[in-house]
Structures are given as C-alpha cells and as structure tokens.
Image (cartoon, helix red, strand yellow):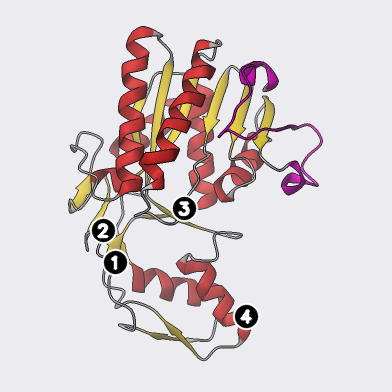
C-alpha cells in the first residue's frame, strides 16, 4: 500500500510519518519546503509541492498513492480569519477533487471539533454540525463538498474529526508549549484562564496512531471522532503536566478570560472510534 501525507512537516504530520514507519507501507511525504523534513527516514519519499497551486499532475507527482492522508490547512490558529472560507476552502476542494479525478481511491481528511460549534456535553458523529467560526465553517463545508463529489466519482472517505491534542513540537501558541517554555525560562508564575472548562485531550502520538489505523483500513468510514471520550478540565490537565514533568511553577488562574468561540463544557463521544479500534486489532 502506498500512502501520501500532505502537511507532512506539521505538528501532526511528523507524528503520522513516525507511526507509518511501523507499518509495511510506502510513504510519500508532501510539503512546501523539503528542507523542513531534513533528516527524515530515507525510506520516505519527499515531494515538494505547494497545494495552493498544485500541478496538473499532482497525483502522479505523489507516485499515484492508494490513500491520501490530508492534514494540510493554512491560516491556523487564527480561527476567526475569513481566509478559511474565502481562500482556503476553494483551494482545498480544487486540490482534493483533482486527486480523486486522477485516480485516488481512498482519502482521509482531518476535520475539527469546531464543526460542532457551541454545543455542550458529549458530541457524537450524529450530532448536527453548527460551526460558529470561519475555520469550523470551512472545514464542515469541505466535508459536504466531498460528500457531493462522492455521488459523481465514488471513493472511500474518512473524515477524522479531531478534538484537542498536545505533545512535543506543538505550536508555540498552544497551552502545552507556552507552559513548557515558561518553565524553561524559569518563570515563577504562569498566566492562564480560570481553567474550569472541560475539554477532550489526547497525546499527539495517540492521534497519529488512530489516523494511521483508519487510513490503512482503506474503507469508506465517513465521519469519526478522534477523541478520548473522557473530559478533563484545562486546569486539571495543566496540573497533570506539572506532576508528570516535575515542573515547578505556579498557575495564575483567571488571568485571561475564557475563549468565546467554544463552549465551557464539551468532549467527544468515543464510541465509534473505540468500536473501530476493537474490530481492527
């Protein structure tokens, strides 16, 4: 099986590449800047390509993969930017449609829990989408566009809806990275929100493992949450990191207001991903 990965040099992409090396598959890593993947395992074929302006033979340049793991998306973490639906959405659809029309038979695209909008509690794949920011709206629109495309040109589609994750080399704006950096600087206090919001977090290594498991199945899975199914408060998670890493710093709770683009209490219903994992073991 040959698997191409877009966004290969990103936070999730690097972990997906590492996980793929544990499987007997050919791997093609697609990135805008090949230098960002310097030192990568020599068995991985690197293809330099700008998906905003893909070549007409993009499928062939990726060595005609059996499956595409599509992680690429520009403009993050500015969730409210109009770029997501004004520019990124048409680019994404144009590229994926070209891949399908050229012969791609299986596609996994990462979605986002922001597709659910301001709904609270346990959110399942059957929960209607109600995105309330441009990023969530654009992702949800892309999913619907691909569903319509399937009616004309059938292919296997897995829409892996991601919740929250953490790990090494995450974006500098993330809670984990900013906390780790504050500790490294020797800061005595770390400013954060009240931390009482409940979220669904997974280590990025587990997210990558689930993405690869779904991909190698080569099935038409549809929407599936990649989540823990177990809510944890942001404060509780930060305190867990302090204990696990033996970090010495005081959490200054309530310094920042809570985000207004997400509900206080929500997490993923993991029933479907749990069942899939049991079936494929």
Contact between labelled residues 1 and 2, with CB atoms less than 8 Å apart: yes
Secondary element under disc 4, as helix, strand or loop, is helix
Marks 1/3: CA–CA distance:
16 Å
**165 to the left or right of 54:** left
> How crowded is the residue under tag 3: few (<14 C-alpha within 10 Å), some, or many (20+)?
few
Quadrant of residue 138 in the image? top left
Contact between labelled residues 3 and 2, with CB atoms less than 8 Å apart: no
Which residue, given by chain and number where applicable, does mark 2 sit on? 262
Q: Earlier in the sequence, mark 4 or mark 1?
A: 4
Which residue, given by chain and number where applicable, does mark 3 sit on? 76
Which residue, given by chain and number where applicable, does mark 4 sit on? 184
Marks 4/1: CA–CA distance:
26 Å
- Frontmost of labels 2 and 3 is 3
Image spot of residue 152 (x, y percent): 36, 8
Contact between labelled residues 3 and 1, with CB atoms less than 8 Å apart: no
> How crowded is the residue under tag 4: few (<14 C-alpha within 10 Å), some, or many (20+)?
few
Secondary element under disc 3, as helix, strand or loop, is loop
Residue 259: image tag: 1
Is residue 37 inside the magenta stretch? yes
Marks 2/4: CA–CA distance:
30 Å
Tell me the residue at 68%/29% (across/down).
28
Q: Earlier in the sequence, mark 2 or mark 4?
A: 4
Q: Which of marks 4 and 3 is nearer the N terminus?
A: 3
Image spot of residue 170 (x, y percent): 56, 59
Q: Do we see residue 66 in this rendering?
A: yes
Q: Earlier in the sequence, mark 1 or mark 3?
A: 3
Q: Nearer the viewer, residue 152 or 16?
A: 152
Marks 2/3: CA–CA distance:
16 Å
> How crowded is the residue under tag 2: few (<14 C-alpha within 10 Å), some, or many (20+)?
some
């Amino acid at each position: 099986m040959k698997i191409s990965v877009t966004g290969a040099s990103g936070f999730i992409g690097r972990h997906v590449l590492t996980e793929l090396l544990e499987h007997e598959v050919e791997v093609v890593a697609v990135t805008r800047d090949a230098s960002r993947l310097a030192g990568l395992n020599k068995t991985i074929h690197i293809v330099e390509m700008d998906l905003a302006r893909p070549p007409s033979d993009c499928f062939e340049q990726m060595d005609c993969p059996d499956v595409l793991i599509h992680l690429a998306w520009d403009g993050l973490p500015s969730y409210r930017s109009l770029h997501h639906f004004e520019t990124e959405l048409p680019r994404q659809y144009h590229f994926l449609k070209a891949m399908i029309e050229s012969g791609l038979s299986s596609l996994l695209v990462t979605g986002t829990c922001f597709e659910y909008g301001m709904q609270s509690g346990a959110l399942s794949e059957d929960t209607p989408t109600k995105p309330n920011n441009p990023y969530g709206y654009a992702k949800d629109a892309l999913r619907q566009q691909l569903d319509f495309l399937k009616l004309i040109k059938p292919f296997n589609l897995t829409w892996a809806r991601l919740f929250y994750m953490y790990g090494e080399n995450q974006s500098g704006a993330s809670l984990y990275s900013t906390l780790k950096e504050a500790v490294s600087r020797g800061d005595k206090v770390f400013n954060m929100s009240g931390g009482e919001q409940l979220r669904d977090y997974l280590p990025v290594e587990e997210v990558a493992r689930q993405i690869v498991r779904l991909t190698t199945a080569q099935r038409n899975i549809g929407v599936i949450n990649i989540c823990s199914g177990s809510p944890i408060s942001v404060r509780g998670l930060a305190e867990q990191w302090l204990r696990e890493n033996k970090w010495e710093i005081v959490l200054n709770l309530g310094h920042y207001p809570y985000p207004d683009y997400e509900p206080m209490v929500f997490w993923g219903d993991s029933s479907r991903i749990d069942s899939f994992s049991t079936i494929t073991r």
